[in-house]
């Protein structure tokens, strides 16, 4: 299944010419250069975990590593008991920029994902089955009437509905979301948050989901557990015990919501002060603050 295990994962961005040199050992890398610093995390099968934190804290980097797009300098990651060794169609990814193929219609984009997953995972779906699954998921995101439209003919919210439908239609063990609603207006964002929860709950079994966001309210609405990141580390985590489905307006009036939100805001402000202090120290060290 989709249980996820992260153990002692570190990451550093390498120089552009690093391909010409050996990769540095962890002990050769200064601590301050590490983007991710000895991360450990267990995610249960079917759990929805939100990673929250300031821009630049490393949350999107860990998601790209989980997607197989980047490799850590140390540590181990396994999904479903199998070591993560690069990109794979046992994971579906939804990015902020929609990532639809512009030369394919909405339905063709979804069918492409289904076909790729079918080939790699040995499902051997026929053309008719692929078409049926694509139609089914277009209906789930209320996009049936747009099946034959191309991405340029769709609004940002409509494109993201198609991207979500493609991720779910692939029927993978694990879903990875990198701020998928970050570029959308407030109304569309709220609609897709509610839709996301409905679709995640609506299958025969909930998928394991890792959802990156800097929006505290979004995390509280969607997550079983929230992990707060700062400076490349997992600092604290919180369980959200509220029953699903969660009505955004009603849930926001509960004591649980207010208490968790207050605690997360405190962490955000503390992390921001630390980040600003670090920036000041770096300017002085570089000579920019010297008088």
Image (cartoon, grey):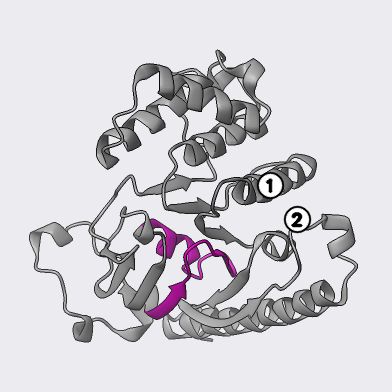
Element assignment for label 2? loop
Q: Is residue 176 above or below residue 184?
A: below
How far across and how far down the image is residue 86, in percent?
25, 54
Counting residues from the N terminus, which is met first, the one under dot 1 or under dot 2? 1
How far across and how far down the image is residue 182, in percent?
63, 49
Q: Which residue is mark 1?
A: 198
Q: Which residue is mark 2?
A: 245
Residue 41 visible in the snapshot: yes
Q: Badge 2 local density, few (<14 within 10 Å), some, or many (20+)?
A: few
Q: Residue at x 67, y 63 (%)?
A: 219
How far across and how far down the image is residue 81, in percent?
30, 66
Q: Is residue 56 above or below residue 28?
A: above
Residue 102 visible in the snapshot: no
Q: Which quadrant holds residue 249?
A: bottom right
The segment highlighted magenta reads 38-64
Q: Residue at x 42, y 24 (%)?
A: 130
On screen, residue 158 versus residue 208, left or right, reads: right
Q: Is residue 56 magenta?
A: yes
């Amino acid at each position: 299944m989709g249980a996820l295990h992260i153990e002692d994962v570190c990451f550093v961005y390498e120089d552009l010419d690093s391909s010409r040199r050996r990769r540095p050992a962890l002990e050769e890398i200064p601590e301050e250069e590490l983007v991710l610093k000895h991360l450990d995390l267990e995610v249960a099968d079917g759990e929805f975990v939100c990673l929250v934190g300031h821009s630049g804290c490393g949350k999107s980097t860990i998601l790209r590593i989980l997607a197989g797009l980047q490799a850590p300098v140390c540590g181990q990651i396994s999904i479903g008991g199998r070591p993560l060794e690069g990109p794979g169609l046992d994971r579906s990814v939804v990015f902020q920029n929609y990532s639809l193929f512009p030369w394919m219609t909405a339905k063709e984009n979804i069918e492409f994902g289904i076909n790729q997953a079918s080939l790699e995972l040995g499902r051997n779906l026929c053309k008719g089955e692929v078409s049926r699954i694509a139609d089914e998921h277009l209906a789930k995101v209320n996009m049936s009437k747009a099946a034959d439209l191309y991405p340029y003919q769709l609004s940002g919210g409509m494109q993201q509905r198609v991207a979500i439908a493609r991720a779910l239609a692939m029927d993978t063990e694990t879903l990875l979301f990198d701020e998928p609603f970050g570029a959308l207006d407030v109304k569309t964002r709220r609609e897709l948050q509610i839709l996301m929860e409905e679709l995640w709950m609506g299958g025969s079994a909930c998928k394991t989901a890792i959802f990156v966001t800097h929006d505290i309210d979004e995390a509280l609405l969607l997550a079983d557990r929230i992990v707060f990141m700062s400076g490349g580390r997992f600092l604290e985590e919180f369980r959200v015990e509220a029953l699903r489905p969660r009505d955004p307006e009603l849930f926001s009036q509960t004591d649980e919501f207010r208490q968790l939100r207050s605690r997360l805001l405190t962490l955000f402000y503390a992390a921001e002060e630390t980040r600003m202090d670090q920036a000041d120290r770096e300017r002085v060290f570089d000579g920019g603050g010297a008088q």
